[in-house]
Image (cartoon, grey):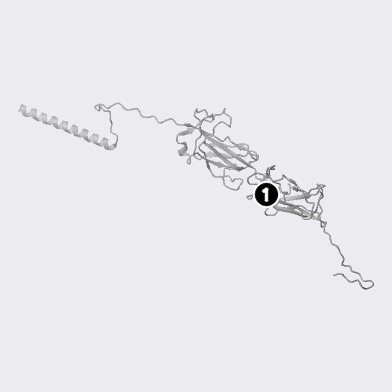
Amino acid sequence: SVLRLTEDGDHDPTLDFGFVQPLVSVGDYVWVDTNRDGIQNEDGTGIPGVTLVLTGPDDEPVTDVYGNPVEPTVTDGEGFYTFDGLPALEEGQSYTVTIDQDASAEALKPYIPTIENPDADRSEDSSTWVATSTGLTEDGDRDPTLDFGFVQPMVSVGDFVWVDTNGDGIQDEGEPGIPGVTLVLTGPNGEPVTDVYGNVVEPTVTDREGRYSFDGLPVLAEGESYTVSIDREASAEALAPYAPTIENPDADRAEDSSTWVATSTGLTQDGERDPTLDFGFVLLPDPVEPEPTDPAPGDPEGELPASGADVAGFAAAAAAALILGLAVMMAARRRTSATRS
């Protein structure tokens, strides 16, 4: 309450006026752009441990409204960050947030920046390493659009199993693919591969056009390679009519054939694909029918016994005929002897 000040010398020291320095803030997200479209989606995952640095309109360090230097900040367990208590800006001025790439090297080791999508809303898009604020001229303003999206670099391999109709070891136009062939991928160490999403890469099967693909694979270091092998047991039915075609040493890698196993090249940069791991097969000739045999003497039909039972029957009949013949001969001899007597 206001003092009455009715006596000489009275003093009222309570007539005070408080003011605040207008303050603003910026932020707020570093995330994995799982579908690689440069837009924050619900299935995105934040990246913790990323260090960000704030600079002012003059590219100098910033002092907050409490008189403290604004230190770098680090994204939390969900990938969020914020710089609070910043002085409001004049029209046309801005704050800049930069990722400290050295300090963030471990956190961002698996990643590279996603695309900057020009069609995305500012509140959902991504900046690459550096982002600049807008507005922030009024007390309480916040710019939460200084976001940074990253992707894990990925590569792919493939892509064709086909019938080499002219047997030259080269993919020619019009030669058909072979569906139902099972292929297995292994990594540089000969072990199964885990894709960039954390899933073990399972065998794949050629489609009805003979095509196959292994996608979402981690990039390789120089000198490393992926290997694709045909699972011969799983592919036995699909490949039953075929044998591998020749490996043509004069053919271009993009058009030649490997026999059962093929090895990639390159694949050290995001987005690269090796489509040259192809397998050609030729159609086996039809089995040759055996020539018919000549008729056996005394067998005008030329038919031979076809089974054990038939052989046994044939032998019994022959034996009976022989016995009958001997009996006839003996009877004739007895008649002759009786006549002479």
User: Which image quadrant for residue 252?
Assistant: top right
Q: Secondary structure at mark 1?
A: strand
Report how many numbered discs are placed on residues in the image: 1
Q: Which residue is mark 1?
A: 31
Which of the pair 238/82 is nearer the observer? 82
User: Which residue appears at 47% of the width and 38% of the height?
Assistant: 238
Residue 285 in the image: x percent, y percent? 43, 30
Apparent side of residue 15 relative to residue 222 in the rendered image (left or right): right
Residue 149 in the image: x percent, y percent? 68, 47
Furthest residue toward bottom: 7
Q: Quadrant of the C terminus?
A: top left
Which of the pair 9/101 is nearer the observer? 9
Furthest residue toward right: 8
Which of the pair 108/135 is nearer the observer? 135
Mark 1, Cα crowd under 10 Å, few <14 / some 14-19 / many 20+, is: many
Query: Looking at the picture, does residue 209 appear above or below residue 33?
Result: above
Give the residue type at disc 1: Trp
Residue 157 in the image: x percent, y percent? 58, 38
Apparent side of residue 331 relative to residue 220 in the rendered image (left or right): left
Furthest residue toward left: 341
